[in-house]
Image (tube, rainbow, N blue to C red):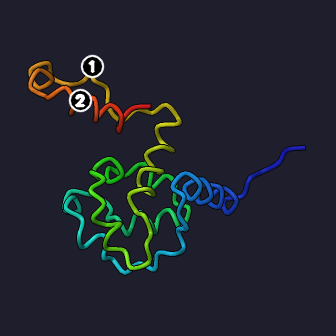
């Protein structure tokens, strides 16, 4: 007997995983957009912080996890301070990164960096990037 996981069950499992890792209730967000309005990195993101929360709420795992936005967040916490419902958006974005990294899909490979650029990067910046972008 084979058991099939429905799309709805898979979406719910993703939502539960993000909520568990982030320690947040995704449904607390009512999409006011204040997080996106204050985000200093929003202009560079393919999806905005409030859209990341919405994708997570809807269980749109592939769309969220394949976005460049989860890697562009600099964890400045501006979104967290602006949220009228107290949703810790940075933690949700970090949870999305963790889901990707736990599959051993690193976002950064130091071997791909240009040696001349690598020589100019302060060691602490390189270490910080490795902590954020690698499993």
**Which disc number belongs to residue 60?**
none
**Residue at image location 47% in from the left, 41% down from the top:** 100
User: Helix, strand, or loop for circle 2?
Assistant: helix
Q: CA distance from mark 2 to mark 1?
A: 12 Å
Q: Nearer the viewer, mark 2 or mark 1?
A: 2
User: Against 10, is 78 above or below?
Assistant: below
Residue under label 2: 126
Q: Position of residue 130 (x, y in %)?
A: 32, 31
Nearer the observer, 81 or 101: 81
Nearer the observer, 115 or 22: 22
Q: Position of residue 101 (x, y in %)?
A: 46, 37
Q: Position of residue 135 (x, y in %)?
A: 44, 31
Placement of the N terminus among the 4 image quadrants? top right
User: Helix, strand, or loop for circle 1?
Assistant: helix
Nearer the observer, 14 or 46: 14
Q: Is residue 9 left or right of residue 125?
A: right
**Residue at image location 59% in from the left, 60% down from the top:** 15
Residue under label 1: 111
């Amino acid at each position: 007997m084979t058991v099939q996981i429905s799309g709805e069950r898979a979406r719910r499992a993703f939502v539960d995983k993000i909520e568990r890792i982030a320690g947040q209730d995704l449904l607390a967000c009512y999409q006011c957009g204040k997080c996106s309005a204050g985000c200093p990195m929003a202009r560079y993101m393919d999806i905005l912080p409030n859209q990341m929360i919405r994708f997570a709420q809807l269980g749109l795992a592939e769309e969220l996890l394949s976005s460049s936005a989860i890697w562009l967040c600099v964890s400045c916490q501006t979104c967290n301070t602006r949220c009228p419902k107290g949703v810790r958006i940075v933690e949700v974005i970090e949870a999305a990164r963790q889901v990707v990294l736990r599959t051993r899909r690193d976002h950064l490979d130091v071997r791909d960096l240009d040696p001349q650029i690598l020589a100019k990067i302060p060691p602490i910046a390189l270490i910080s990037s490795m902590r954020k972008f690698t499993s």
